[in-house]
Amino acid sequence: MTMLEKFVAFAQSLPAESRHAVEGALAVMMASYSDEGAFTSIELDELDRRVAEPNAEYVAPEAIADLLGRSIAS
């Protein structure tokens, strides 16, 4: 019996109220393997370009705090 088969048997043996929590966790895990939110090749190229920037400029922490309504450290 594979681990997947053991998991399915385990989940099927749970009472309905407990099964909902397992199904929710499984849905999150399955979504994490989805390409739906994956970067496009253009976005990946832009990220590579930005990371390689030798003289990168960053926004002031105060601007971020104004945007978020709190400091990043909070």
Image (spheres, rainbow, N blue to C red):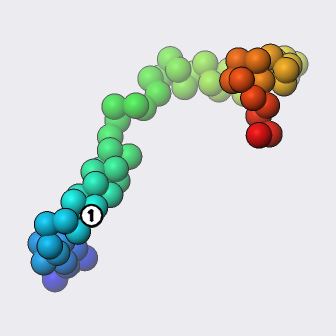
11 lies left or right of 73: left
Q: Using the image, determine if residue 71 lies above or below residue 73.
A: above
Residue, x 85% and y 20% (percent of image)? 62
Q: Position of residue 5 (x, y in %)?
A: 16, 74
Residue underneath mark 1: 22
Residue, x 53% and y 20% (percent of image)? 43
Dot 1 crowding, Cα within 10 Å, few <14, some 14–19, many 20+: some
Residue, x 65% and y 26% (percent of image)? 48
Quarter-of-image position of residue 24: bottom left
* Residue 53 in view (yes/no): no
Label 1 is placed on what type of residue? Val
43, 19: nearer the viewer: 19
Q: Position of residue 1 (x, y in %)?
A: 16, 83
Q: Position of residue 27 (x, y in %)?
A: 27, 51
58, 35: nearer the viewer: 58
Q: Using the image, determine if residue 31 lies above or below residue 3.
A: above
Quarter-of-image position of residue 67: top right
34 lies left or right of 4: right
Quarter of the image containing the C terminus?
top right
66, 48: nearer the viewer: 66
Residue, x 21% and y 60% (percent of image)? 20
Q: Using the image, determine if residue 17 lies above or below residue 2.
A: above
Quarter-of-image position of residue 45: top right
26, 35: nearer the viewer: 26
60 lies left or right of 35: right
Looking at the rendered structure, the secondary structure element under dot 1 is helix
